[in-house]
Image (cartoon, rainbow, N blue to C red):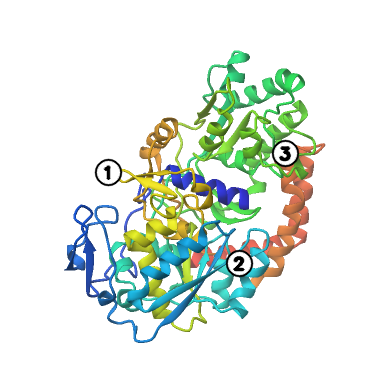
Amino acid sequence: MRKKVLSVILSMIMTASMLAGCGSASSETESGSMENAGDIEIKDEATATSASVSLDELPAKIGEGIVKATPEMYGDVDLSEHKTVNITLIGDTPAAWDDVLAKTNEYLEPFNTEVEVSFLSWSDYQQMYPLTLTGGQVDLIFTAPWCFMYTEAAKGSFYVLDTDFISKNMPLTSRFQAAESWDETTISGQTIAVPSNQASPMGKIVAIRQDLADKYGISSLDNWDDYMNYAKTIAEKETPESGIYALAASGDNNELWDLYRQQEDTFLALDSDYFDLIYNYKEGSLPEASDIKLVYETDLFKSYANDMKELADAGAWSRSALTNTVTDDDAFGNLQGASIAWNTSVFTYIEQAEQTEGVVGAAYDLTKNNLVGCECYSNNDMAIAAGSADPARAAMVLDILKCDTYLNHLWILGVEDEHYTINDAGEYTETDKAGDFAAYAISASWAIKNGDLKEAGGDPRAEKVTESWEERVVNNPTVTFVFDDSNVADYKAAVSAVLNDYVPMLELGLVDDVDSTIDEMIKACYDSGLQNVLDEFSTQYDAWKATR
């Protein structure tokens, strides 16, 4: 999971200036009618002067002017006492964090507020996250569909937000947050988190060593069959010579699977580790519950698994790929692999590989006539803990982090002129000290992004790919359906255990017979209670669909 998360983060950086709504129609949601909540102070970028203006006089959207928060705009928040807002984030602590935190608290002095931040490291956040909410002192916490959002919401761990609370305590968010985004953090009619304010195209592409392709007379890749040919050619001719695998797979081939299924315009109605429910997208309609299938019962996955066995038998990756600890991305960047698949984050590893003389990378969209999925607003969120000592003060801090230009950029990019510089066009460039606080280094930065930041000098190849997606981006129409598995948690856990045993080796083709192995896995899933989970899913989905 961490590998995929980091890959998505890298893609965010590359696509930060791209699409804002990803093809989804705006709807009147809880935030849709939020109105003015007072006056704020706005700082003119050129003159560095400020004047008290109403919210209606602010820029139409974030990025079209400097936004500066002042205590006066939070008239409904009791600021009479100095208070500390405790924030919990996941991930490793940046080397320059103490400096960023000190500047944050200096900035918050006029609000009679300071923040303390705790980081749950990648190595232990899965164990510590639930404990933090039950026994820790926390006001704000990072969450996401992949980071306990649904399970903790079911426990009542998050403070429930409503229009009145947001308009009073988060007036900037009330004004600037995309109206359609709130649906994605609303579960059973209750809004339990504040989503990011950016949705980005997340199409899947394949990156290859073009210098190796040219070596064997392969000029370009246009479709999946071309990729199969490239991988088998590398396995046959290059691997014995140099030891470079066609794909230095690690753990599974889930990223390649996501690229493969893009050929048939699929979306996931449930994305829960390997427990995935899939359907084929039809424009203008929601799928019926009967159209939503366990991925591994589809002909599409069976076809993919057979292709993976063909590549595995050809030697496209190591027979020890299940236990490899070096990711395929890092292996590609270190010249140990000849291809990787994922989103535009692949260009980061292309550039890493190209630091070696003679190495040339290229990326190909193998599904040019298919839809491009969209990263959801809710893929990264901040929630107020239900046990917060002062939810209003916590909301105010989050509002400032999300919308105040200075603090937002501080938490996303670090200290200006130390970790990054920014040009007249508003494009940032990381400095040689960015290793101490890289762009989007902390999880909060993923949740407070607004789509206004773009890196200067981005790889033009990545820009060309993302530009080609603009007309094909489609938002998953089932994204706002949230499956509450509390009634079938034991069954779902048992099925997931089966899938964890079988899916990685199927995705790597490391089985004697694909069809019989899939049949064996499916039988074990049903023996573990899969039908109970599917029935509960269908019941909830039908009830949700009836309200749309």
Query: As rendered, which of 170 and 499 lies closer to the eye?
Result: 170
> Which residue reaches farthest right?
512
Residue at the (66%, 36%) spot, across then down = 331
User: To which quarter of the image does residue 167 belong?
Assistant: bottom left
> From the viewer's perspective, is residue 215 above or below residue 321?
above
Number of residues whose C-alpha sits closer than 10 Å to that of mark 1, classed few (under 14), some (14–19) or many (20 or more): few
Query: As rendered, which of 440 and 341 lies closer to the eye?
Result: 440
- Element type where label 1 sits in the image: loop
Instruction: Choose mark 2 or mark 3, whichever is in front.
Output: 3
- Element type where label 3 sits in the image: loop
Q: Which mark is residue 536?
A: 2
Can residue 361 be seen here? yes
Query: As rendered, which of 516 and 205 lies closer to the eye?
Result: 205
- Give the image location of residue 219, x and y in percent: 54, 16
Instruction: Say what amino acid the circle numbered 1 marks.
Output: Asp
- Give the image location of residue 452, x and y in percent: 34, 51
In the rendered image, which residue does mark 3 sit on?
A: 508
- For marks 1 and 3, give the CA distance: 48 Å
In the rendered image, which residue does mark 1 sit on?
A: 424
Instruction: Choose mark 1 or mark 2, whichever is in front.
Output: 1
Instruction: Say what amino acid the circle numbered 2 marks.
Output: Glu
- Give the image location of residue 138, x and y in percent: 53, 76
Q: Earlier in the sequence, mark 1 or mark 2?
A: 1
Can residue 545 be seen here? no
- Give the image location of residue 483, x and y in percent: 55, 65
Marker count (numbered) = 3
